Amino acid sequence: MSTGSGNDKPRVVVVTGASAGLGRAIARAFAEDGADVAVLGRDADRLKSARAEIESLGRRAFDAVVDVADHQAVEDAAAAAEQELGDIDVWVNNAMVSVFAPVVDISPEDFARVTDVTYLGYVYGTMAALRRMRSRNRGVIVQIGSALAHRAIPLQSAYCGAKHAIEGFTESLRCELLHEKSDVRVTMVHMPALNTPQCHWVKTDLDKHPQPLPPIFDPHAAARAAVYAAAKPRREYWFTAATARAILANRVVPGLLDRYLGRYGIDSQKADRPIEPDRPGNLYDSVAGDFGAKGEFTSQEKSRSVQWWTTVHRGALAAAGAAAVASIAGWRGLSDRAR
């Protein structure tokens, strides 16, 4: 799905949290799709690696060391990216941190840090994008959301709260853009659990190594969904049936999900091995090393989603369905006349 802007100029895309995990996969997916990409993140070495990956695909790249909790740093990075690559066409907010622990074991400082990065980082990124896009009356902002923006789970209260906040912030912004009759678009892509390095470095006091709440999906597949959403922005996308089930079930039987997750949700986020005593944490500082996009649960991940395939091809499926209905109606008409 091309992110081209309708002429020979490739789109310029900014991705936050792009040094590893889903952000790294998204940056690569946009480059594969023909875009020039600015990668923002906290780890200089990993950003250089991400930049080299984009350039190896024949695309221009720009990297900036940024903590998205610093609004001025985000603004400065946006200005530098435009100076290096040109007008920003797509801005992808993706950067996040989290804590895996019960509410009573999370410090106020840790709650504030998760909120500053995972929620306010999206706010600051959106504001930087809007400063540029509104005056040009074009551009797309992609908010990487989560099933957990609709259905919270135990042990991730700080992250779930931030994702819920992003949903509310984006709904408000969408109304304002509609009021302005702006051609700037904002879309959310709600993701399931992904096999990223998050569980290697997320802050936790669990007795066992943390793992994503299954089912777990390939971040590269999720990244392609983000590229598609940027090219065809609509109000929101749900990537995979797992995300759709969580959102829809919470609308219908939220109390039942409360009880189910209270019974099974905690143990399901613990791998069958003890946590390492010297395990690194990335809540306040980045963890050294080039981790790429994928985490350590490759053997458990799913790489395809029938639900997403039907989303991408829904136009063709609707046309095929209409043709089938017309054919049946025609056949019945011929049968009636033949009697």
Image (cartoon, grey):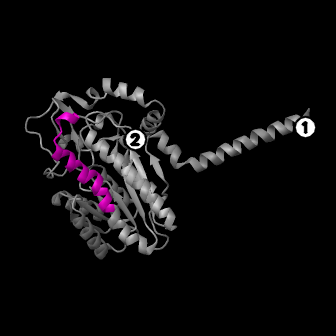
Secondary structure, mark 1, is helix
Q: Amino acid at mark 2?
A: His
Magenta: predominant secondary structure element? helix
Residue 174 visible in this rendered orientation of the protein: yes
Q: Which residue is mark 1?
A: 337
Q: CA distance from mark 2 to mark 1?
A: 53 Å
Asked where in the image residue 212 lies, by quadrant, the reply is top left
What residue is shown at x 27% (from left), y 45% (from top)?
294
Query: Does the magenta segment cover residue 108?
Result: yes
Pick the front one: 200 or 160: 160
- Relative to 52, does residue 160 appear above or below in the rendering? above
Residue 10 included in the magenta stretch of the image: no
- Location of residue 169 with respect to 302 vertically, above or below: below
**Residue drawn 43% across the image and 63% down it:** 140
The magenta segment: 101-125
Q: Is residue 180 left or right of residue 263?
A: right
